[in-house]
Image: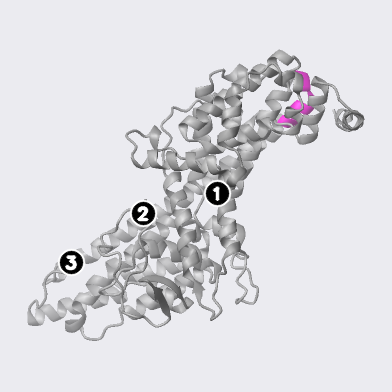
Amino acid sequence: MPQTPPFTGQLNTSSYNKNLYQTKEEGYPGLYYHDNNLVSGSLEALIHHLVPTVDYYPDRTYIFTFLLSSRLFIHPYELMSKVCHLCMEQQRLSDPQADKMRVRKIAPKILQLLTEWTETFPYDFRDERMMRSLKELTHRLASGDEWGQKLRQMVDFEVATGPIFTGGVSRCCPTVQECGRALAVYRKAVGQMSQGLIRRLTVLSQYEEALVKINATAAERLTALKAKPQAAIQRDMLSICNDPFTVAQQLTHIELERLSYIGPEEFVQAFVQKDPLDNDKSCFSDRKKASNLEAYVEWFNRLSYLVATEICMPVKKKHRARVIEFFIDVARECFNIGNFNSLMAIISGMNMSPVSRLKKTWSKVKTAKFDILEHQMDPSSNFYNYRTALRGATQRSITANSSREKIVIPFFSLLIKDIYFLNEGCANRLQNGHINFEKFWELAKQVSEFMTWKKVECPFEKDRKILQYLLTAPVFTEDALYLASYESEGPENNMEKDRWKSLRSTLLSRV
């Protein structure tokens, strides 16, 4: 009975996933299909469907979709506990002759499921309860405990009666030495999985620490700007680098790095905090969740304000016009690269009121290129032009001949909006209480595409000086931007005059 067509560009196929449409039982209780696609099911049935058996391994699209969406209904550590329990049930065997092949075939499959979980959702394992359950289950797989005892029972049986079976996941072991080698293989695989998980969590912690330092440095430089504005203003983007292509490349470095740390589960955590059938208890209230999605949104806002700051800072109109034209060129290079997020952040910065009101400055700017970029990111018809360009970039990425052509960095706020409306537009549960899995296939499809984009490595050489400036240069608040704007081109009406006076008395008195 098929589950669903696989996602385009979804994770690499597994050695245990030869048949995407294999199921453990026809008509498994609690699972419902339409046109051979899984559309709904009870939580318990869906959990059973996740756990491998001797002749079944769930397809990877199901694993990803269920692990992504299940956290809306059950804590990941509770799910892990149930998975462990079901796995133990699979290996409670009494007859070594009859079940020899069962143990040998089920162990690698369970280990493969755990590996996929730790690789795709590593942040789940920041929870100590998750790590404890993982260690307990892998201990049974890789040690001389219950699973190892079963293997030794089978060896004892073979020594007494001679080998009966051959083939399967591993060759029958006629000697204790070969059984030891089989156990060693499991231990090695468990060790590799554990080391990979620890490495990912360590890298995440280092990244979070680096963000804290970057934000602290940016705050210190803003304080210095307020204390000595004339000295701090002397440095600007053009003094650091006046090549738009190079700046666009460095922006792409920042974008891809920050994208790479966003876990797929963060999209779910961002919108739904509780399951109404779970006594209104938050599914995330007691978990150490990652905040990389929020950090990425903050980066977009920072870049927008940085662009506005760079435009409003210069005293001379000619210099302001030059800065605007420079960032238009940077935005165009971002578009050519496929970096739509930086493109939109730059456009947003230029369209902020303190910048757009500088009519004398804009009169000196050749705006034809900017008009084209605004047309590409026009929000009308649900961002039709942008979505067309995104599809083109995605197709280019699929057929890429170079690493540069693989880059697709979506306008992130719109991606979040799309997922939000998908979530709001469909119920998590059907009237009979079953989980609406049709909804979660679609959710997983959108997140899966993002997962492909975030794995691309930036092909451009890093420029530490430019990166440091982009990440830590002082940016004005909205009030400070308005004040700088009024200082550059005076107020045009009484309302602006009143605001200018208010801002001068408020902001300048703090210096």
Residue 405 lies in the magenta-colored region? no
- How packed mark 1 is, by other alpha carbons closer than 10 Å (few <14, some 14-19, many 20 or more), is some
Q: Is residue 291 visible?
A: no
What's under tag 2, amino acid-wise?
Leu
Q: Report if the CB atoms under discs 3 and 1 are less than 8 Å apart.
A: no
- Among all residues in the image, which is located at the extreme bottom? 94
Count of numbered circles in the view: 3
Between label 2 and label 1, give the one nearer the viewer.
1
Q: Is residue 318 above or below residue 466?
A: above
Name the residue tied to disc 3.
Answer: 170
What's under tag 1, amino acid-wise?
Leu
Q: CA distance from mark 2 to mark 1?
A: 20 Å
In this rendering, position of residue 453 left or right of residue 415 = left
Residue 451 on image: x %, y %: 44, 50
Write the start and end of the magenta stretch as one range. 222-230
Name the residue tied to disc 2.
Answer: 11
Q: Quadrant of the C terminus?
A: top right
Residue 442 on image: x %, y %: 47, 60
Name the residue tied to disc 1.
Answer: 415
Residue nearer the viewer, 330 or 157: 330
Q: Secondary structure at mark 1?
A: helix
Q: Secondary structure at mark 3?
A: loop
Task: Identify the residue at horizontal 57%, vertical 31% (top origin).
Answer: 373
- How packed mark 2 is, by other alpha carbons closer than 10 Å (few <14, some 14-19, many 20 or more), is some
Question: Which badge, 2 or 1, comes first in the chain's sequence?
Answer: 2
